[in-house]
Image: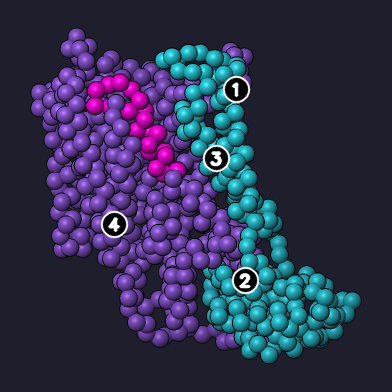
Amino acid sequence: MSNTHTGDSPALHGIMAEFTNADALVASVRAARLAGYSRMDGYSPYPVGEVADELGFPRSEIGAIMFIGGLCGATFGLLMQTWITVYDYPISIGGKPFWSWPQYIPITWALLVLTASLSGVFGLLALCGLPQPYHPVFNVPQFARATRDRFFLCIESTDPNFGDGSGVKTFLATLNPDSIAEVPE
Amino acid sequence: MATVIEPAVRGPYSNELYAPHPEGLLGGNHNTVTLGDKIADVVIGGRTPKAWWAFFLFGFMLLQGLVVGLAYLFYMGTGVWGINQPVAWGLAIVNFVWWIGIGHAGTLISAILLLMHQKWRTSINRYAEAMTLFAVSCAGIFPLVHMGRPWLGYWLFPFPNNMGAWPQPRSPLMWDAFAVSTYLTVSLVFWYVGLIPDLAILRDTAKHKLQRMVYGMLALGWRGSAYHWRRYEKLYLLLAGLGTPLVFSVHTIVSFDFAVAIVPLWHATIFPPFFVAGAIFSGFAMVVWLAVPLRHFYGMKDFITDKHLELCAKVMIATGLLVSFGYFCELWMGWYSHSLYEWETTYQRIWEGPYWWSYWCLITTNTIIPQLLWFKRVRTNELLLFLIAGSVHVGMWFERYVIIITLSRDHTPGAWGRYAPTEWDYAIMLGSVGLFITLFCLFIKFLPMISITEMREFLPFKQGGRDGHAVMENAK
């Protein structure tokens, strides 16, 4: 095992440390942030909100996406029904005005929910880059437990303080992890 | 691969004895690993209980009724059913409303209980959502085939066409098409989004290459990144926030199919809340019906505890009383309105008409028998609870039957008529039950019936979880 990056070994995605519980991961991410690392990610079998907080991702974009999606769907629904009943195919139903907007609410609402939900789901997939069949973290054998009972912190090689990785390993070793592994690209 | 520190020895996780769950929502002695293994093992372990085969074959057999019934219906037309004037709706609409009512508890459990911080939803939300999907699929068949020319079903939706015509957006029937298809789509994505982390668990614990490939593809490469979790939880919360009013609006619109008509006893403002309460009532009855075999044949008593059944029973007594209040309101309004037609139709419904017995079946099964749920001894007795839930299924079916059959005696005696379902009505009805059982059995066999991820989060800190740390607090 060598800490120096030679031409034969694959490029590094990062260095990964393994922890046994969520609190250790939260504490480690905080320590890494205070040590000046910025390009890193935490992995856990269930959501641990504090990790994202410590990573500097306090608020996701999903709310805004769904709001805009819902607004578009509702506007489309109302305009579509207006177009049908007022302009393209006006017929008198029980003497109601052509633009009887209260009766357009159910479909407007259904389209609001539909477009908001779908834009949220597709927004999630797009922002997370899913589906993504290959990702370097899966090269680490113990990462199979990331969906089981282990928590991982990966400091990525794009971090300005990454260097050749040896400093990162020394730093991660101070966090008392269960294991430390290089993540080949 | 260069490993700096070797992984820790992977022995048995821990043999520690944990304190019983303070709210009784968790049995056994589980930590994140044993919990995940127990649920995932049903899917990837390969051992299928004999009861699964019995249920599956029974459901598959009934499903043939749907296949044959629909084939004959498409060949002959809707004349093979008992429908005619004045009762033009018949069992098709009874079954449609019955199924869609059952289909409402899944999203309700998942969404409303999530918003209300009810931790007990975690054990039942996954299979209740699956129940929703399958029940809505069953429901969707009926209005489609009831149209008589189902191959023109797309005419329900507005699209530019060379006839220059549009469907009527002032009609509840077009609302229905939008509401039900939106509900099915949103329930599907809500269910699938919830499944993604569990599919990743199955991918990582799979025993065969095929399992790993299929679950791997379905998991979309989920890796549990903190950035992804943050977005995921926000999406899940917002879907729940949209799903809750959606449940109410969908069944409200289903009730508008009736309430917007001017048939006596249909034209009532009580219909939307009355229908929504009935939907929740029947949905929880179905949740109980599904929970009991899962507990019994899959040993899920640790996760679906007696406490869960009791809580379902409490929701049933509450919604059952709301529904009974609706029955009382109908009688009261019939009498107090001083409307000749309202009162006469009420009188025909409960006493004088040929279908008086169906009204009393409804009152017995939906109002009287569920009163037993007031007793804790009944709520905690699995068999009795199962039987009462069965009574609710019958009662909720009769509720819709009583409403439909009202058409047989409306304003003028000259327009009165009779209605009797034919064997083809029953073939399609039982066939839809078969479709539901078949789909649910396949779901149990191939997907985790309880959300592993959410159950792990729900575990107390000592057992490796986040102590029911609610999704609400992480969703930002």
What label sits on residue B312 in the rendered view?
4
Instruction: Residue at 63%, 45% (x, y): give it.
Output: A68
Q: Of residues B462 and B171, which is closer to you in this image?
A: B171
Q: Residues within 10 Å of mark 2 (few under 14, many from 20)?
A: some
* Label 3 SS: helix
Tell me the subunit letter for badge 2: A
**x, y (%) of residue A13?**
77, 72
* Stretch in magenta: B246-266
Q: CA distance from mark 1 to mark 3?
A: 18 Å
Relative side of A6 to B447, left or right: right
Q: Which residue lies under the disc numbered 3? A: A112
Q: Amino acid at mark 3?
A: Leu
Q: Are marks 1 and 2 in contact (CB under 8 Å)?
A: no
Quarter of the image containing the C terminus of chain B? Answer: bottom right
Q: Are marks 4 and 3 in contact (CB under 8 Å)?
A: no
Tell me the subunit letter for badge 4: B
In the image, is residue B424 above or below residue B196? above
Q: Which residue lies under the disc numbered 2? A: A53
In the image, is residue A68 above or below residue B383? above
Residues behind callouts 3 and 2 on a single chain: yes
Instruction: Residue at 47%, 33% (x, y): give it.
Output: A106
